[in-house]
């Protein structure tokens, strides 16, 4: 593997390009590591009452829709997002995944999953009593993300 760093004083934003012959596990791991480092600093603008907050993305447990309103949940608080769920899927880091038509989850914050064969499975988080449900159709993809996290 060859690593090259190019300095450009006209550069406005850092850019990382990975050149590879094929997409394999090593390339995927490098991409995830870079994305994770970049997202640790990333913040999302959320709202509560008339106040605008800048919350680190890594602190979000999950997003869920409640009618036309998209709620972002942290351990202690709930905020409103102006983004739609499909827009959030595009901008959130790899460790967020869709778990139902109405929710996106941060897999790094999952504490436990109580599987229910006939209905939605309950997901619990570290340090809070908040819960969200993963629908049967999204359960396998969630478990795949959880496995990726362990590797």
Image (spheres, rainbow, N blue to C red):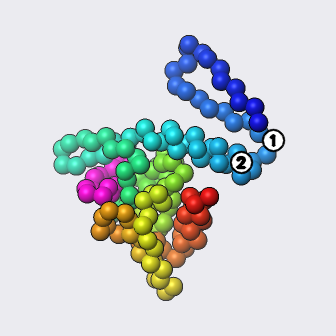
Where does the image place residue 122, in percent across and percent down from the top left? 41, 75
Question: Left or right: 72 with respect to 24?
Answer: left
Residue 50 coordinates in the image, percent (x, y) = 18, 44
The front one of 69 and 111 is 111
Which residue lies most toward the bottom here?
118
- Looking at the image, the residue that sits furthest to the left is 50
Seen at 45% across and 42% down, the residue is: 40
Q: Judge left or right: residue 84 versus residue 118.
A: left
Q: How many marks?
A: 2
SS category of the residue bearing label 2: helix
Dot 1 corresponds to which residue? 21
Q: CA distance from mark 1 to mark 2?
A: 12 Å
Instruction: Tell whether position 22 is magenta.
Output: no
Residue 27 percent coordinates (x, y)? 70, 45
The residue nearer to you, when weighing 110 against 136, is: 110
Q: Is residue 42 above or below residue 124?
A: above
Q: Quadrant of residue 77?
A: bottom left
Q: Residue at x 30, y 58 (%)?
A: 75
Which span of residues is magenta-colored?
Answer: 71-83
User: Where residue 78 appears, x then y in whole percent?
Assistant: 27, 56
Find out whether residue 77 is within the magenta segment: yes
Quadrant of residue 123 within the rendered picture: bottom left
Is residue 120 visible in this depiction of the protein? Answer: no
Residue lying at the far top in this picture: please name it: 9
* Pointer 2 residue: 26
């Amino acid at each position: 593997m060859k690593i090259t760093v190019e300095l450009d004083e006209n550069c406005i934003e850092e850019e990382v390009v990975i050149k590879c012959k094929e997409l394999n596990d090593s390339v995927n791991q490098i991409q995830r590591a870079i994305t994770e480092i970049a997202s640790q600093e990333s913040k999302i603008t959320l709202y509560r009452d008339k106040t605008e907050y800048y919350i680190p993305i890594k602190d979000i447990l999950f997003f869920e829709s409640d009618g036309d309103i998209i709620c972002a949940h942290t351990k202690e608080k709930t905020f409103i997002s102006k983004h739609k769920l499909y827009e959030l899927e595009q901008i959130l880091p790899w460790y967020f995944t869709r778990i139902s038509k109405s929710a996106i989850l941060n897999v790094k914050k999952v504490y436990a999953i109580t599987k229910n064969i006939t209905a939605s499975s309950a997901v619990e988080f570290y340090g809070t009593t908040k819960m969200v449900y993963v629908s049967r159709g999204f359960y396998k993809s969630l478990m795949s993300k959880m496995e990726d996290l362990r590797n």
